[in-house]
Each structure stands twice: as structure tokens, then as C-alpha cells.
Image (cartoon, helix red, strand yellow):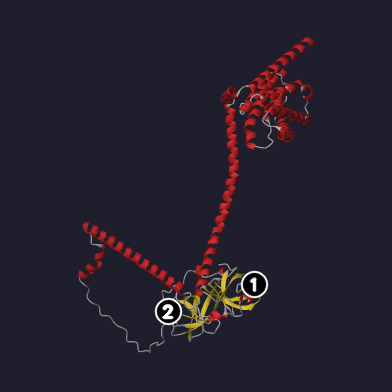
């Protein structure tokens, strides 16, 4: 028994020694022989395991790359979300810069800070005060037109009344000076949006829908020529001696962020011509749209005529009366004998001499979504 | 060990080898677990020292073939670890997870010491750092993984009642 154990131990030691010697021999092999030996093992026994390891490495790289790709996609979508805001802000700032270059001097740029209070949809805080030359009743304008007027001034900031304020009034007129009136806020409770009323327009003066209304310069607060809004329609009021028009405001009060406060010395020079190019551009755009519409209409008429001619020729070929020949057939057919018509006696009652409404029927107001929403209001 | 036990041990051995070439590169840890050492140790305690030395030699050569510059170093280390584990199985062969964990830890650490010294690629402070910091860490991870796998594969490793 003891001999068998000793024999087994001897065999174990011999095998161990042989393995160690072989391993040392492998370790001592020169590079020229070591590489072929390793390559041989890799290409025979180890092929499936190397394949597994390769796939695992690829899987790990995919996992790591997936994290990087996900973070890249996240930042990309975040940037794309910011891009629209940046574009709109850029556009707004471009307009402000363009307005500043047209006004040239006598203005103070400021940011409008909207509050979240109950009456804050009618007032804003401006980031410029008396140290920058802002005084009480200084006009506040935006690239689109009239915004409001400063009513309280601090050294570093000021408080402005927007045109939506119930106490706000401005003398306004049509650009050609044929119609004058007083513009004030008009709260449309049904739509939840603010519009402007132009009240006290003389009865002889009519304004067509889409006509621009600007400040008249009367009163000494507002210079002449600042866009107030565009005419939507005439509204009926109890004032029978004057007309009242509903205007779509040039400036949406909830979109006011960058404004300009006009200084006193600038008021005397007026602002005529500052918005003239904008008005001309709008008129040109409208003309382009109208000409485009008429071109489309002409094309549609030509197509309809061609289609009708084709149908007529097909009808003639089939021996049927052409579709467009109804009037001529009726002209050739014998007419029935005329029936004497008994006319009613002439109306001797006095005629209504009241002048009729001169507003055109086709003056359809724009869709409701063009009406600016009050901040916090829902449709 | 009967035939059923041998087959189960072989399956376990293959599972560990496959894990070494799949899970280890997938995790890519700085102190990686060594499933080949675990496979060698689990096989060594079930065979004679001579067989354990041969298994260690073959496993070492296979692992060395992926790093031809160190061809033979892994074979020497694994041969020694396998033979030692089989020779000392009377000491460590116990159904105690903590003892098995220590067994795995020691086996991996001894392997690393022999491998890095035999490889002669790392020298000086780097070698000391490798042997005293990263190798024990890797041995600890290997021991933890080994204990976990032993716990999971207990039905496969225990001898059948029949």
C-alpha cells in the first residue's frame, strides 16, 4: 500500500517535472519558433474561443459606443430644441437692430420683464431707468410698432403701461391722414385676446380691412408714424356720429421682450419714414400674393375651357348636342307666346334716404388664430 | 469519481472556459476575474496531481497562445497551481464557501506572481504595484465570481446520491 502511494507520488512528480520542462522550453523558444507555435495553437484549438472573445469585444465596444451615441443624440436633440428659440431670438434682435439703425439716435434699448401677477398683462418692467435718460411718458416701441408708455421711472429701471392697459390712449390715423381717431384696448371676452379699437373716426372717413393705422403725433407723447395696427372690421357702437374700427395690434403684448424707449429730444424729430420701408414691403408682398392668385385663376379658367372643348368635341363625335350649346339651342327653338304680366301698382311711399353702409361685404376678418392671445388666456 | 460526476465536472470546466472568453472581455475590468484559474482549480481537486499538472499545462499554453511573447509563462504558472491545488486538496477540499473563496484567491494570486515574474515584461515599481495591488484585486474578484458560480452550479458539482 505504501509502495503504491510512493509510486503514484513519483509519477506525479515526473509528470509535473515534464510539464515544467516543456513550459520552460516553450518560454525559451526563439521568436522565430515561438510565433508559429502560438499561431498553430490559435488556429486549431483556440479558434472557437478566439471567435467568442472577438464577439465579446465587439459587444463591449458596441455597448460603449451606444452610450457615446446616446449622449451625442441627446445633445443633438437638445441643441435642436434650443435652435428654434435661438432663431426666433435672433430674428427679434435683428429687427431691434434694424429699428435702431433706422431711428439712429435718441433711444434707449431695454429688455421687457413680464410679471406673473393679475394685472401684469397690461404692464411690464423695463431694464432702463432715469440714469439712461428715460423719463415719464417716454414712448416704448418695438420693431413691429407701438408697445406702450413709461409711467414710473426709477434710476435703473422703469415701469411701462402696455397698450392693453384700460387707461391707455393714443391718437391714431391712416398713413394718408384721411382718417383720425383715438386707439385704445378692446378686450374681446369671447376669444380671450386683446384687440385695439379705433374710436371717433369721422363718419365720412372709411377704412378698408387690412389698412394700416399709425400714431398721428397729436398730444405730444407719441411721435407721428408708429404702427398701431391694421384694420380688421368696423364695429357698431352707440356713437352714431362717428365710426369705430377694430384693429389687429401691430405688437402682441406677450411677445414683447426687446424694446426701445424714445427720449424726449427724439420726439420732436418724428419717426416718419422709419416704418415706411416695412409698410412698402408689406404692400409689395400683398401685391405679389394678389398677382399670384390671379395667375392661378387664369390657369384654372384655361384648363376648364380646354376640358370643356374636349367634352364638346367628344359629344359631337357621338352625335349628342354639345354641353356648351344649351344657349344656342334655346335661341333657335320657337319661343312660347308671351304671357301678359300684371305689374303691381307703383310704390308711392317715401323712400329711405338714409345712406347705406359703405363697408364691403367681402371684408372677411382673418381667422381667430391671428388675434394675439392674452398672457395666460386659453382659447 | 464515476462517469456522471466526470461528465458534470467536464461540463463545468467547459462553462468556465467559455466564460473566460466571453464574460471577461465583455466586462473589460481593470482587475479582471480569471475563469481559467477557477476551471483549473475546480478540475484539480477532482483529479490526481499529475493530471492536474497536465491540465494546467494545456490551459496555460492555450492562454499563452494569445500573447506569444509570454508563451510558456502561463503554462509554468498554471502547471504549478494545478499540481499544488490537487496536492493540497485534502486541506482545502471542504464544503465551505469561505474556504473555497480563499482557495480561489490564493490560486489566482500565486498564478499572477509566477506569471508576471516568468513573463519578464513588467519590472520594478510597476511589477510591485501589479503584484501587490492589481493581482490581489483580481484574485478577490476571481474568488467572488468563483463562490458565486459555485453557489449557482451547486447541483451540477455535487455528487449524485445514487
Give the x, y percent position of residue A295. 34, 66
How crowded pointer 1 is (Cα within 10 Å; few <14, some 14-19, many 20+) is rated as few
Kindly indicate the quadrant of the structure image that contains residue A360.
bottom left
Q: Which type of secondary structure does the marked residue at label 1 adopt?
A: loop
Lateral position of residue A134 relative to residue B117, left or right = left
Q: Is residue B63 above or below residue B1?
A: below
Q: Which mark is residue A318?
A: none
Q: If the image is split into quadrants, where does the C terminus of chain B sit?
A: top right
Q: Residue at x 62, y 29 (%)?
A: B67
The local crowd at label 2, few if under 14, some if 14 to 19, many if 20 or more residues have their Cα within 10 Å, is few
Lateral position of residue A105 relative to residue B7, left or right: left
Report the front residue among A5 and B77.
B77
Where residue A176 sits: x, y (%)? Answer: 43, 81
Q: How much space separates mark 1 and mark 2, taking CA atoms?
A: 38 Å
Which quadrant of the view contains residue A346?
bottom left
Quarter of the figure with the N terminus of chain B: top right
Q: Residue at x 57, y 67 (%)?
A: A378
Residue at which label 2 appears: A359
Which residue is identified by label 1? A118
Please give the name of the residue rendered at 66% of the width and 76% of the height, measured from the top-left corner. Answer: A155
Disc nearer the start of the sequence (1/2): 1
Q: Position of residue A192 (x, y in %)?
A: 56, 71
Q: Is residue A163 visible?
A: no
Disc 2 sits on a residue from what chain?
A: A
Identify the secondary structure beneath mark 2. Answer: loop
- Do circles 1 and 2 both sit on a common chain? yes
Report whether A118 appears left or right of A86. Answer: right
Using the image, determine if residue B133 lies above or below residue A71.
Answer: above
Amino acid at each position: 500500500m505504501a509502495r503504491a502511494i510512493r509510486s503514484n507520488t513519483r509519477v506525479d512528480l515526473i509528470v509535473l517535472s515534464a510539464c515544467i520542462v516543456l513550459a520552460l522550453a516553450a518560454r525559451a523558444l526563439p521568436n522565430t519558433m515561438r510565433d508559429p507555435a502560438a499561431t498553430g495553437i490559435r488556429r486549431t484549438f483556440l479558434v472557437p474561443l478566439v471567435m467568442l472573445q472577438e464577439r465579446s469585444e465587439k459587444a463591449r465596444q458596441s455597448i460603449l459606443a451606444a452610450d457615446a451615441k446616446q449622449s451625442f443624440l441627446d445633445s443633438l436633440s437638445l441643441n435642436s430644441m434650443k435652435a428654434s428659440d435661438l432663431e426666433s431670438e435672433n430674428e427679434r434682435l435683428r429687427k431691434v437692430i434694424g429699428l435702431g439703425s433706422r431711428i439712429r439716435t435718441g433711444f434707449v434699448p431695454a429688455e421687457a420683464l413680464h410679471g406673473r401677477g393679475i394685472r401684469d398683462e397690461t404692464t411690464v418692467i423695463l431694464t432702463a431707468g432715469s440714469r439712461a435718460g428715460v423719463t415719464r411718458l417716454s414712448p416704448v416701441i418695438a420693431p413691429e410698432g407701438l408697445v406702450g408708455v413709461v409711467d414710473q421711472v426709477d434710476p435703473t429701471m422703469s415701469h411701462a403701461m402696455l397698450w392693453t392697459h384700460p387707461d391707455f390712449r393714443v391718437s391714431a390715423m391712416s398713413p394718408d391722414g384721411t382718417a383720425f381717431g383715438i386707439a385704445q384696448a378692446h378686450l374681446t371676452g369671447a376669444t380671450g385676446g386683446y384687440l385695439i379699437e379705433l374710436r371717433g373716426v369721422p363718419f365720412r372717413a372709411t377704412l378698408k380691412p387690412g389698412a394700416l393705422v399709425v400714431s398721428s403725433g397729436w398730444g405730444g407723447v407719441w411721435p407721428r408714424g408708429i404702427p398701431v395696427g391694421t384694420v380688421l372690421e368696423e364695429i357698431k357702437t352707440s356713437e352714431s356720429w362717428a365710426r369705430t374700427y377694430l384693429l389687429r395690434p401691430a405688437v402682441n403684448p406677450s411677445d414683447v421682450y426687446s424694446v426701445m424707449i424714445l427720449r424726449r429730444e427724439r420726439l420732436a424729430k418724428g419717426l416718419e419714414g422709419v416704418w415706411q420701408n416695412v409698410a412698402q414691403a408689406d404692400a409689395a408682398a400683398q401685391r405679389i400674393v394678389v398677382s399670384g392668385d390671379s395667375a392661378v385663376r387664369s390657369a384654372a379658367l384655361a384648363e376648364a375651357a380646354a376640358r370643356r372643348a374636349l367634352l364638346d368635341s367628344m359629344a359631337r363625335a357621338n352625335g349628342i348636342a354639345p354641353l356648351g350649346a344649351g344657349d344656342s339651342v334655346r335661341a333657335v327653338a320657337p319661343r312660347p307666346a308671351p304671357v301678359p304680366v300684371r305689374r303691381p301698382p307703383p310704390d308711392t311711399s317715401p323712400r329711405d334716404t338714409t345712406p347705406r353702409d359703405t363697408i364691403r361685404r367681402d371684408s372677411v376678418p382673418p381667422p381667430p388664430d391671428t388675434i394675439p392671445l392674452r398672457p395666460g388666456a386659453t382659447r | 469519481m464515476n462517469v456522471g460526476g466526470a461528465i458534470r465536472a467536464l461540463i463545468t470546466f467547459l462553462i468556465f472556459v467559455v466564460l473566460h472568453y466571453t464574460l471577461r472581455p465583455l466586462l473589460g475590468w481593470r482587475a479582471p476575474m480569471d475563469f481559467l484559474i477557477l476551471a483549473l482549480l475546480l478540475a484539480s481537486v477532482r483529479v490526481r496531481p499529475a493530471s492536474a499538472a497536465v491540465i494546467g499545462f494545456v490551459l496555460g499554453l492555450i492562454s499563452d497562445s494569445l500573447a506569444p511573447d509570454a508563451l510558456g509563462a502561463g503554462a509554468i504558472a498554471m502547471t504549478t497551481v494545478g499540481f499544488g491545488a490537487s496536492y493540497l486538496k485534502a486541506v482545502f477540499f471542504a464544503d465551505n464557501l469561505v474556504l473555497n473563496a480563499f482557495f480561489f484567491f490564493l490560486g489566482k494570486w500565486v498564478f499572477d506572481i509566477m506569471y508576471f515574474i516568468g513573463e519578464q515584461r513588467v519590472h520594478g515599481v510597476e511589477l510591485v504595484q501589479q503584484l501587490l495591488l492589481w493581482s490581489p484585486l483580481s484574485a478577490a474578484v476571481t474568488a467572488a465570481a468563483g463562490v458565486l458560480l459555485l453557489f449557482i452550479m451547486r447541483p451540477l458539482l455535487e455528487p449524485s446520491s445514487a
